[in-house]
Image (spheres, helix red, strand yellow):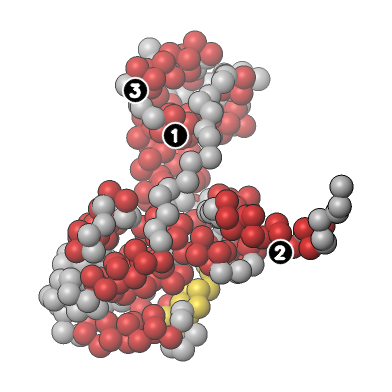
Amino acid sequence: MAECNMSLHTDLQIFLEILATERGFSLHSLTSYQTDLLAFIASLQSPLTTHINMQSCSEFLDRLHARKLSPKTIHRKMASLNQFLKYLLEEGHISSNPLATMDRPKLGLRLPRILSQDEVLALIEASDTHDPNHPFRSRLILEFFYATGMRVSELISIERHCIMPGKGLTIRGKGNKERFLPLHPIAWDVLNDYTATLSQIKLGGPHWLFPSPKPQQHITRQRCGQILKELALLANLDPECVHPHVLRHAFASHLLEGGADLMGVQKLLGHADISTTEIYTHLNHEQLRASLFKAHPLAKTKKRKE
């Protein structure tokens, strides 16, 4: 298989277009890939495929370690590079993928901090007095995160026409896949109160549920995260422990603790693989012990006499 001396910058642009059009990657994901891969290309002697080998990949990995990046960040950057090298290999631009035989940082199972039900309720109560210029918005953001488990990128880009009154809403998640999310009655009440005020708020485009002050735009993920941290301060919680992913985790964990079906939670979260959903489960030792004694057939029998 002959190597091609086409500039890697050209290859990168084609690769990113494939991720966007064929695999439905979000702008946020594409930006991360571009940043990671431009850094790799810049580390080479020249932006040509002939300089991609075991040594150049090892030196790039050493640079990442020298910057004292977390194992998770290094793992993500190497995963981006691995996907790019796979593409180059499939296109015949390189003869082998050096990363195929390289060791990468091992990631242990690390769950985010879990908000208790009382802490979530404290956030909801705090939302009632937060930001009077945008009535019900903070409360609705909390309700959507905790009532559906949606991602922040999915929440900020909800369009009004995707809401089906009395039923739920449809959103587009990773891979541009559409899924339906039901809403409980309380969330509907908050949604109705919020939408009634939208006509009075001259922000963004008329089709976004959460419009931005900028014309034709929705609020940013940064602003959404800032709102949650402001609510955390009002609720006397550590703002560093309150962000969209933690609420998504609380949604899944509290559902499972309440007896929800794992496959049902998987569909609500939009996970392609149920093993990903299992990462969001969190049962403490007492819950596990109670489940074992309740379900195991031998645990129900009387203790045998010695």
Residue position marked by numbered label 1 in the rendering? 72
User: Can residue 121 be spotted in the picture?
Assistant: yes
Q: Secondary structure at mark 1?
A: helix
Q: CA distance from mark 1 to mark 2?
A: 38 Å
Q: Residue furthest left?
A: 133
Residue plotted at (21% across, 85% down): 197
Q: Position of residue 295 (x, y in %)?
A: 74, 62
Residue assigned mark 3: 68
| Residue indicated by mark 2 | 294
Labels in figure, total? 3
Q: Is residue 18 left or right of residue 223?
A: right
**Mark in the foreground, 1 or 2:** 2
- Marks 1 and 2 in Cβ contact (< 8 Å): no
Q: Name the residue furthest front.
A: 306
Picture coordinates of residue 258 (x, y %)?
A: 56, 69
Mark 3, secondary structure of its residue: loop
How crowded pointer 2 is (Cα within 10 Å; few <14, some 14-19, many 20+) is rated as: few
Q: Is residue 174 above or below residue 204?
A: above
- Answer with left or right where residue 33 lies relative to residue 231: right
The amino acid type found where label 3 is placed reads Lys
**Mark 1 crowd level (few <14, some 14–19, many ≥20, 10 Å Cα):** few
Q: Sequence-wise, which precedes: disc 3 or disc 2?
A: 3
x%, y% of residue 64? 38, 22
* Left or right of 37, for residue 271: right
**Label 1 sits on what residue type?**
Lys
The residue at the point 36 percent across, 27 percent down is 69
Three-letter amino acid code of the residue under disc 2: Lys
